[in-house]
Image (cartoon, grey):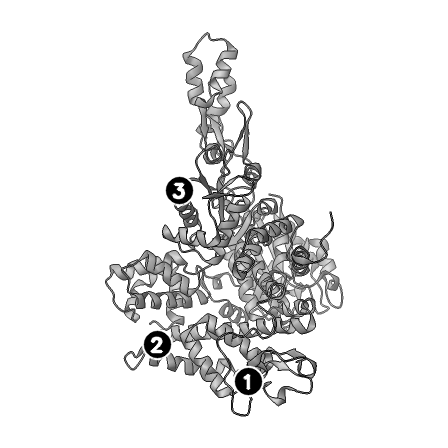
Amino acid sequence: MGSDSTGRTTLFDSVDDVVSRLAGVGYLASTAVATTVFLADRLGKPLLVEGPAGVGKTELARAVAEATGSGLVRLQCYEGIDEARALYEWNHAKQLLRIQASQGQAWDEARDDVFSEEFLLTRPLLTAIRRDEPTVLLVDETDKADVEVEGLLLEVLGDFQVTVPELGTITATQRPFTLLTSNATRELSEALKRRCLFLHLDFPDAELERRIVAARVPQLPEALAEELVRIVGVLRGLELRKAPSVSETIDWARTVVALGLDTLDDDAVRQSLNVVLKHRADLVKATSELRLN
Amino acid sequence: MDTPQRGLPAHLVDFVHALRDHHVDVGPGETVDAAAVMAELDLLRREQLREGLAAALLRRSGQRQTFDALFELWFPLGQGAALGEVALPYADDGSVDVDALRDLLAELLAGGDTAALAELARAVVDGLGALGPGRGPAAGGSGGQGRDGQGRGGADQPSGFSSYQALNRVKPETLLARVLAELRARRQEEAADSPFAEEVARRETRARIADFRRMVQAETTRRGSEIRGREAAARTGVRRQAEQTDFLSAGADTLADLRRRVAPLGRHLATRLAARRRRAHRGAIDMRRTLRRSMSTGGVPVNLVHRRPRPGRPELVLLCDVSGSVAGFSHFTMMLVQALREQFSRIRIFCFVDGCVEVTDLFTPGADLGGILTEVHSRRGLVAWSGHSDYGRAFDRFAERWPDAVTSRTALLVLGDARTNHQDPGLGVLAAVVGKARHAHWLNPEPQRQWGTGDSAAPEYARVLPMHECRTAAQLAGVVGGLLPV
């Protein structure tokens, strides 16, 4: 851990440092991933990671947190998420109790009392900003949130400060390493994208995927892993509704180990292909196109 | 402050301009970011620089191909031949030994070593792709030129490079059978491979051969840019983004690209068309917000807050022109329809030429699009008369045969070029149908300037229902985005 010219502490020294430290916690990063993580850290910008489901977007945040010894704060977005769920909220029930418990107290006193730290429920964004320790903030599935929440994110991610009217402005003592993920189900606003570095995380190449499988499922013989990755690569070339991603490859490798298979012949593939392909139509298509029946 | 006229900053700005010329919107803010990236990275690590610049400059995954192609031109791997370890085999007379080259290529394809293949691609372009002055294609490869990689200039300078010429002599696709045999021999498995294993190997090899072709083409662009200047190379050698490609002229791989972009658009359109009901007064009570609101009445929940209702389920009716004049478009139409089919629970799909048929049942999830299109064309009633599109007759038939298809809850989408072959456009019938529908829109694959020319009845139709020019995926996204205020 070093610091840059402005004295801000940085997490990584070089791109190679990113690769080796992420590998140390079991995340094998491609050049693209390592470079963007390094830059996001150096430039102090949020990193927007886009890509199909199951290529390790969320996993990347976890790995960065683990590799740098930071705490991971996660904001899971969903349709209808609002400020009260993302930023902060006053604990109304507790405030009511407080007011009822102190009948007859002067108004000024009660007000100052009720709007104090004790009654503040911090939600992930505020939590991340207030933490003193190194923090990784993960905003997961940003595309699921409504457009209004993007405006909120803009404000928070721009300056890393939040204004609570009753308490004043809270500024981050240490900028959290911020990672936003998106499945690209809708276009995020240009304004949000402009504030972030952009990483399109795609399926890894065969070589990297082999190494990932070897790292995650070490029990699997090397030859079998290679065969597996080859078949997955071919499956991705078919026009499927849901192309298998890395997590499916790993699941498949685990299945093969669990079933105790030592070769991937037709029967074995037929038996276990449903681990990789989740849609029935995809299964039917793959079996017929690859002449499995 | 002086504006940099040369050096790295100027070069970066130049690169950004090239990106803008190719419809990648890069703002000055991004350019500044890119400069900061260059300051942080080790510039000698080319792959890191590429990824770093992409992270700063791009905002959308579809732009990556364009970016890569331009990056190759502005930050080239090297000047001249830049040959690596893999060298071309030469015959005794100094010309390239094509047979030995094909052996080498087959071996590399079987091994799947991407780096070695890339080096071979460079060597192939250098040795076989050069178009020399007075050394036409007939003269064969340009001999010993590649071996020393220097000493060119003057009369020896090739006038250009052609991937067609190089690939035509190597003919990588004819190597498929040989590579497969080689693979089989390597594995030394029991004599007969199962059809599955063979199919996997075949598809894998085919993908590698396609990759090799792409490498050769990219290298040709790079070498060509040294001769013609990179601006000229960027204009001609860099493919347009899938989003910007005209539907009517899209090639096979652009279509595959488009398909990936259209699926999310279907989902998008579905949410846009979903009629939003007013907040219901009855429904589940939202405890959290009720409690919050009760603050103003001293903690007594006087005003109840209800949860928002789920968005209503929209109904959609699609009317698609599938006649010959929109053949390129209808493939896209089918993609869009398929995407919509998966989003809408209540959808009815009608296709027409001069008759009209309902084809909703054909669009089962995961069905093959090519198959659907053939099936649509073999439906009885689609062609009632001449086989040329006749919108008036088709609308008549639609209104008469399925009067209940369009109701006050329906969104109606018409897809077609509005070319009626000088027949009656059937405006009255269409207006009646549109009047019944909640929303109606027409997507036209023709450029707007051609509307109303020849037999196009587009301006007449546009008076009945809003018509949108929809030639590219980008335009479709714009139409969908602007369709309804959310």
Foreground mark, 3 or 1, reads 3
* Amino acid on which the number 2 mark rests in the picture: Pro
What residue do we see at 56% from left, 73% from top?
B82
Name which quarter of the figure residue A230 lies in. bottom left
**According to the image, label 2 marks what residue?**
B195
Q: CA distance from mark 1 to mark 2?
A: 31 Å
What residue do we see at 51% from left, 82% from top?
B88
Describe the element under mark 1 as helix, strand or loop.
helix
Do tags 3 and 1 sit on the same chain? no
Q: Could you tell me if residue A102 is visible in this image?
A: yes
Circles 3 and 1 in contact, beta carbons < 8 Å: no
Up/down of B480 relative to B230, above or below: above
Describe the element under mark 2 as helix, strand or loop.
helix
User: Tag 2, which chain?
Assistant: B
Q: Which mark is residue B169?
A: 1
Left of A270 or right of it: where is B128? right
Left of B451 or right of it: where is B400? left
